[in-house]
Amino acid sequence: MLDFREAGNERTDKHWLPIIQATGDKALFFEFNDDVNSYTAQDFLTFQAGNPNSLVSVVALARENARMVRDQVTVEIWEEINRIYLFLKSTSARDLWDSNPSNSTRRLNSVHFICRG
């Protein structure tokens, strides 16, 4: 997404189906969406709670795992995972996404980097 200046046109839309296929979630994607375009693909990969590989789902699992071993992780790790989780579940994340997908992609990439750390 960062390579393209504009989202939502034919040039960018055609690049999303291979990405969805690479995640192994093509069938699941089409359970939630009728067609592949920049918005539906990015929404599915980022916010779709029904997608176990979405950023929201992965962060929720990381938070749950950290909660279960809370006494074994540092306060800083717990607070960062919790902060990311709360941000992604907030209306602020969705509002940021809806207002400017390009900027939110940059911010969410930093979340992804922190999670993979």
Image (cartoon, rainbow, N blue to C red):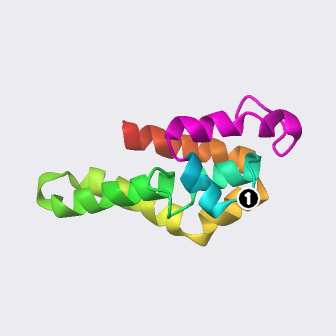
- 48, 24: nearer the viewer: 24
Residue positioned 43% across, 61% down in the render: 85
* Residue 5: in magenta span: yes
To which quarter of the image does residue 16 belong? top right
Q: Is residue 82 left or right of residue 100?
A: left
Mark 1: which amino acid? Asp
Q: Quadrant of the C terminus?
A: top left
Residue positioned 55% across, 69% down in the render: 90
Q: Residue furthest bottom?
A: 91
Q: Which residues are magenta?
A: 1-25
* Residue 53: in magenta span: no
Q: Is residue 74 left or right of residue 42?
A: left
Residue positioned 73% across, 28% down in the render: 3
* Residue 9 visible in the snapshot: yes
Q: Residue furthest left?
A: 71
For mark 1, what is the residue? Answer: 34
Q: Is residue 80 left or right of residue 25?
A: left
